[in-house]
Image (cartoon, helix red, strand yellow):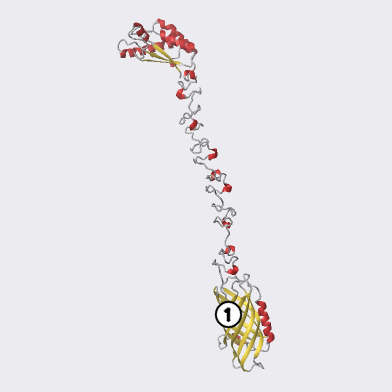
């Protein structure tokens, strides 16, 4: 018996010498048992309705690995069969338990966990009655083997059922032991930092942290309040995803062309103060929206308003229109559609001989009092005007008739118109294009001399010639 006891103790310490790899390695089993006689009486093994061989069993389990546990147990009960054998049986055993819920056969977290076991043990028989060969009371070695199922109820408790065959390796009865009971944890899992990860699985048991980081808090190397795992710049403090954004424009400094001045993404973080789509560094008018290099150009003539003399009217001459291209803006050009010279207010240059001829004609165009018939003394000057107009086709003439103040004003107005048309008709008769000549009368208006004298009234009876350009 001492030999077998020594074998069991050595086996137990060998099995329990493995390092603890789970946080909760020790469990206790308390079971109700029923022993069934097997030696030469196989029919009794399956007589489940007979419960007069009941007893109890207490065991201690020790976690070894995902696949293996060790169990040391003690049981006490009756063993009888009809009137052939009856006695008390006490056994102790040490078993290696193979768990099928090891991740290779069934999932580790399965609620129903089958297992197999094999071990060594000692059976002690007492109070024997009946006839069973020459069997005597005493202690005998056995090999217990069998299977069971664990039903996991909570994290710290299970219901177990087993069928164990106690195979005697000496001249002693072998029997089946059926059991059902409960298993519960002996230990209390500790979670010092309260992060839901038990200390033995927690790489930082005194600092709360997530399971994905093995129970350790995520670091924040630069101390900017953004954890390294979420920090785009873990070694440099910043407010934009953990990166510096000095100007606070939502663009991190490393990607910001203007890191100290708030700007927009379109220009790489540089500003466009007036919002005209031209960044300030390239905008000639950074504070006023515009389309011409960032400056306003209302008339779209390519000259910014601040340099445009006519900002609301398109033009090429300092921003002003110059329709005839003579370098004189239309508003100052007496002849805006005909190129001229500044000395003549934008009109074409008139030769001196033409001016002299016109001045002479004005003096020599004469009419008798109350008449619209030209005096013959007027013909020579008008002939010279006609020749000059045929030679210089760039201009026309406006003929304005006037009278002296003698007589009725209305009649004088009519008379002045006839006199202007008389001079016009004469020039046409001399070959001047009638489209180049216009005539009108203005009566006694605009006298050039004193109407109280004979000479003055003669001077006021006149037709003035004015050069016009189309």
Residue identified by numbered label 1: 29
- Residue 125 at x, y = what percent? 63, 90
Query: Which element is circle 1 on?
Result: strand
Q: Nearer the viewer, residue 190 or 417?
A: 190
Let me know if residue 329 appears in the view.
Answer: yes
Question: Can the viewer see residue 43?
Answer: no
Asked where in the image residue 229 lies, by quadrant, the reply is bottom right
Q: Residue at x 30, y 12 (%)?
A: 408
In the rendered image, the vertical position of residue 203 relative to residue 33, given as above or below: above
> Would you identify the image quadrant in which residue 397 lies?
top left
Q: Residue furthest right?
A: 3
Q: From the image, which quarter does the C terminus lie in? A: top left
Q: Position of residue 136 (x, y in %)?
A: 65, 92
- Provide residue 414's location: percent of width, then percent of height: 33, 13
Dividing the picture into quarters, in which one does residue 411 lie? top left
- Quarter of the image with the N terminus in it: bottom right
Whether residue 238 sits left or right of residue 437 in the image: it is right
| Image position, residue 288 (x, y; %) | 48, 37
Q: Nearer the viewer, residue 105 or 364?
A: 364
């Amino acid at each position: 018996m001492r030999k077998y006891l020594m074998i069991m103790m050595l086996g137990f310490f060998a099995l329990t010498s493995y390092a603890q790899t789970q946080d909760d390695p020790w469990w206790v089993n308390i079971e109700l048992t029923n022993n069934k006689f097997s030696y030469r009486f196989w029919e009794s093994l399956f007589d489940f309705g007979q419960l007069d061989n009941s007893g109890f069993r207490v065991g201690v389990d020790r976690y070894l690995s995902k696949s293996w546990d060790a169990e040391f147990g003690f049981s006490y009960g009756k063993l009888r069969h009809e009137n052939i054998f009856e006695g008390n049986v006490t056994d102790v055993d040490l078993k290696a338990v193979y768990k099928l819920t090891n991740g290779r056969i069934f999932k580790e977290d399965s609620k129903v966990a089958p297992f197999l076991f094999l071990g060594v043990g000692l059976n002690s028989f007492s109070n024997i009655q009946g006839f069973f060969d020459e069997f005597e009371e005493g202690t005998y070695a056995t090999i217990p083997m069998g299977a069971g199922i664990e039903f996991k109820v909570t994290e710290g408790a299970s219901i177990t059922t087993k069928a164990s065959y106690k195979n005697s390796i000496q001249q002693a009865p072998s029997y089946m032991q059926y059991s059902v009971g409960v298993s519960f944890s002996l230990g209390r899992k500790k979670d010092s930092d309260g992060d839901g990860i038990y200390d033995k699985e927690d790489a930082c048991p005194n600092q709360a942290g997530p399971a994905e980081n093995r129970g350790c808090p995520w670091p924040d190397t630069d101390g900017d309040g953004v954890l390294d795992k979420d920090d785009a710049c873990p070694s440099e403090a910043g407010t934009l995803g953990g990166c510096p954004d000095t100007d606070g424009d939502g663009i991190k400094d490393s990607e910001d062309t203007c890191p100290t001045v708030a700007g927009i993404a379109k220009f790489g973080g540089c500003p466009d103060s007036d919002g005209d789509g031209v960044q300030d560094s390239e905008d000639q008018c950074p504070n006023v929206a515009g389309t011409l290099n960032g400056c306003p150009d209302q008339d779209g003539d390519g000259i910014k308003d601040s340099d445009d003399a006519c900002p609301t009217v398109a033009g090429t001459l300092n921003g002003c229109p110059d329709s005839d291209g003579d370098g004189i803006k239309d508003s100052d050009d007496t002849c805006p559609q005909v190129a001229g010279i500044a000395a003549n207010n934008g009109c074409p240059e008139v030769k001196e001989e033409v001016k002299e001829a016109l001045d002479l004609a004005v003096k020599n165009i004469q009419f008798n009092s109350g008449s619209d018939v030209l005096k013959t003394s007027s013909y020579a000057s008008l002939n010279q005007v006609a020749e000059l107009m045929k030679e210089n086709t760039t201009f026309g003439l406006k003929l304005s008739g006037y009278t002296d103040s003698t007589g009725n004003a209305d009649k004088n107005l009519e008379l002045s118109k006839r006199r202007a048309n008389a001079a016009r008709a004469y020039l046409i008769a001399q070959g001047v294009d009638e489209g180049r000549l216009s005539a009108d009368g203005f009566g006694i208006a605009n006298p050039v001399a004193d109407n109280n004298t004979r000479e003055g009234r003669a001077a006021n009876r006149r037709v003035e010639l004015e050069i016009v350009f189309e």
